[in-house]
Image (spheres, grey):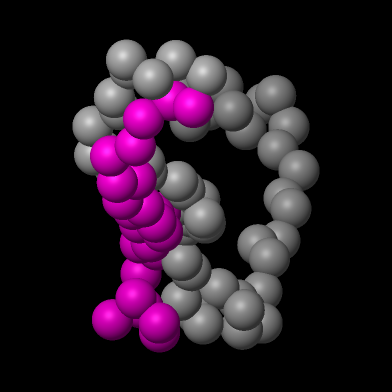
Amino acid sequence: MLTNPTAPMIRPARTVRTLIISYENRQNRNRLYMPRYVFSISEESQFVMGEYLNRRSDLVPAAVVQVSEDSMQKDVH
């Protein structure tokens, strides 16, 4: 549905999860780092628009009609 939607939707961000295994610091041998995950965003989230936005509209702009002050006052009363 996200590849060809009919209405605007949001595609979630793509993330990469990297596991860093435990290791000790070479300069300070009494320090041990435990395993952890680092998350990176490789692609930001974005709106996905359907093909209906790429088509030319078949609608014709409305005609502009000039209205005089006299006709506006007649409509009010």
Foreground residue, 70 or 13?
13
Classify residue 71 as left or right of residue 30.
Answer: right
**Residue 73 showing in the rendered view:** yes
Q: Position of residue 19 (x, y in %)?
A: 31, 50
Q: Residue at x 36, y 52 (%)?
A: 18
Q: What is the span of residues highlighted in magenta in the rendered image?
A: 1-26
Q: Position of residue 41 (x, y in %)?
A: 47, 48
Q: Quadrant of the C terminus?
A: top left
Foreground residue, 39 or 37?
37
Q: Position of residue 25 (x, y in %)?
A: 43, 25
Q: Position of residue 56 (x, y in %)?
A: 66, 82
Q: Residue at x 50, y 80 (%)?
A: 52
Q: Quadrant of the N terminus?
A: bottom left
Classify residue 32 as left or right of residue 75.
Answer: left
Q: Residue at x 28, y 39 (%)?
A: 22
| Image: 49 above or below 23 | below
Residue 53 occupies quadrant = bottom right
Residue 11 occupies quadrant = bottom left
